[in-house]
Amino acid sequence: MADTNTARLDRIEEKIDKLADAMVSMARAEEKISSLQDDHEKMYERINRLSAKLDSIEKKIDENHRTVSLINKIVYAAAIAGIGTYVAHMWM
C-alpha cells in the first residue's frame, strides 16, 4: 500500500513539475509578447513621425517646383527677347 501511495505521489509530483515548467514557459512567452507590442507601438509612432516629415517635404518640393517653373519661364522669355533684339538689330 505504501509503495502504491509513493508511486502515486511521485506521478503527482512529476505532473506538478510539468505544470510549473509550462507556467514558466507561458510567463516567458507573455513577456516576449509584451516586449514585441512595445516595439510595435514605438515603430508605429516613428512611422507616423516620418510620414509627417514626408508630408512637409512634399509641400516644400511643390513650392520649389512652382518657383523653378516661374524662373524657367522668365529665362525663356528673356532669351527670346534677347534673340529678337539681336535679330532686329541685324535686319535694320
Image (cartoon, grey):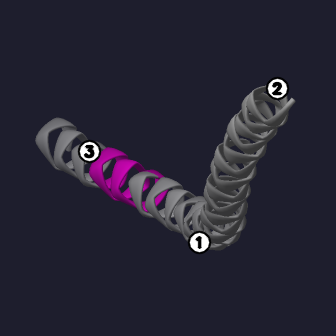
Q: Earlier in the sequence, mark 3 or mark 1?
A: 1
Nearer mark to the viewer, of 2 and 3: 2
Dot 3: element = helix
Observer-nearest of 45 and 73: 45
Mark 1: few/some/many CA within 10 Å (<14, 14-19, 20+)? few
Name the residue type under label 2. Thr
Q: Residue under circle 1?
A: 53
Q: State whether residue 12 is above or below residue 44.
A: above
Image point (24%, 44%), residue name? 83
Q: Main secondary structure of the magenta part?
A: helix
Q: Quadrant of residue 1?
A: top right
Q: Residue under circle 3?
A: 88
Name the residue type under label 1. Lys
79 drawn magenta: yes
- The location of residue 25, given as percent across then percent down, is 64, 46
The residue segment tinted magenta is 73-81
Mark 3: few/some/many CA within 10 Å (<14, 14-19, 20+)? few
- The location of residue 51, given as percent across then percent down, is 66, 62
Observer-nearest of 80 and 69: 69
Tag on residue 4? 2
Image point (71%, 51%), residue name? 20
Q: Earlier in the sequence, mark 2 or mark 3?
A: 2
Q: Earlier in the sequence, mark 2 or mark 1?
A: 2
Nearer mark to the viewer, of 2 and 1: 2
Image point (64%, 46%), residue name? 21
Q: State whether residue 29 is above or below residue 51.
A: above
CA distance separating discs 2 and 3: 122 Å
8 drawn magenta: no
Give the side of residue 49 with respect to residue 2, left or right.
Answer: left
- The location of residue 42, given as percent across then percent down, is 63, 70
